[in-house]
Image: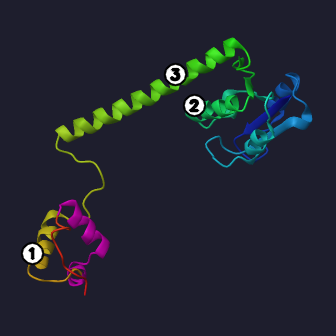
Amino acid sequence: MLIGYMRVSTDNDRQVLDLQRDALLGAGVDERHLFDDRAAGSRRDRPGLAAALAYLKSGDCLVVWKLDRLGRSLPHLLETVNSLRARGVGFRSLTEQMDTTTPQGEFLFHVFGALAQFERSLIQERVQAGLAAARRRGRRGGRPMAIDAEKLAAVIAALDAGATKASVCRTFGISRSTLVDSLARIGLMSALVVEIV
């Protein structure tokens, strides 16, 4: 059985499902087996897609007008189609002429999967190279220090002189969590055993 899924990005009248509906009906999907969503593709909560996926059973085929109507991203698309395959459900995209029930469609789907993996690897490689270049230039990642070096030195001197964390926080106008995080970043938190009074 063919099950159709349609999606438009907005809930207003400017975008309609007519083009997708006509294409799916023309491909042989019964009107009673059409599911739709009116939400951006990046949204996780798409009740129409959830209902379509729940309705599918082994031997069925999910049909969409275009690949981007189904997946939030290429990895999400691949994950969805792989889960369909594991359940014995086929997938067909009309615009791209991809049909996983045929050997050619299955091959094309594997090519898409390989490209997605390649893209993820390239992104990871670029991120790691950028971080290494920044470290070579003396920059550290993460959030900037909430307390400047001069103020932190005064805070440490006060704590060394016996002041409590609570009094240091009041005196320097900083929160306890900022004090604890700043001390932990420079490795002093474990050395200080000063209780809050």
Residue 27 in the figure: left or right of residue 193: right
Residue furthest out toward the top: 104
Residue at the spot x=17%, y=38% of the render? Answer: 136
Left or right for 175, reference 90? left
Front one among 7 and 186: 186
Q: Label 3: which residue?
A: 114
Precedes in sequence: disc 3 or disc 2: 2
Q: Which residue is mark 2?
A: 74
Q: Quadrant of the N terminus?
A: top right
Q: Is residue 148 above or below residue 83?
A: below
The amino acid type, in three-letter code, at marker 2 is: Leu
Residue 120 point in image, percent of width and height = 45, 30
Q: How many marks?
A: 3
Q: Is residue 175 visible?
A: no
- Lateral position of residue 157 relative to residue 26, left or right: left
Q: Quadrant of residue 30?
A: top right
Q: Which mark is residue 157?
A: 1
Q: For the residue labelled by badge 1, is the local secondary structure a helix, a strand or a loop? A: helix
Span colored in magenta: 166-187
- Give the Cα separation between the discs numbered 3 and 2: 11 Å
Mark 3–mark 2 CB contact (< 8 Å): no
- Whole-number angstrom distance, CA of label 3 to CA of label 1: 57 Å
Crowding near pointer 2: few (<14 within 10 Å), some, many (20+)? some
- Mark 3 or mark 1, which has the lower sequence index? 3
How crowded is the residue under tag 3: few (<14 C-alpha within 10 Å), some, or many (20+)?
A: few
Q: Is residue 172 magenta?
A: yes
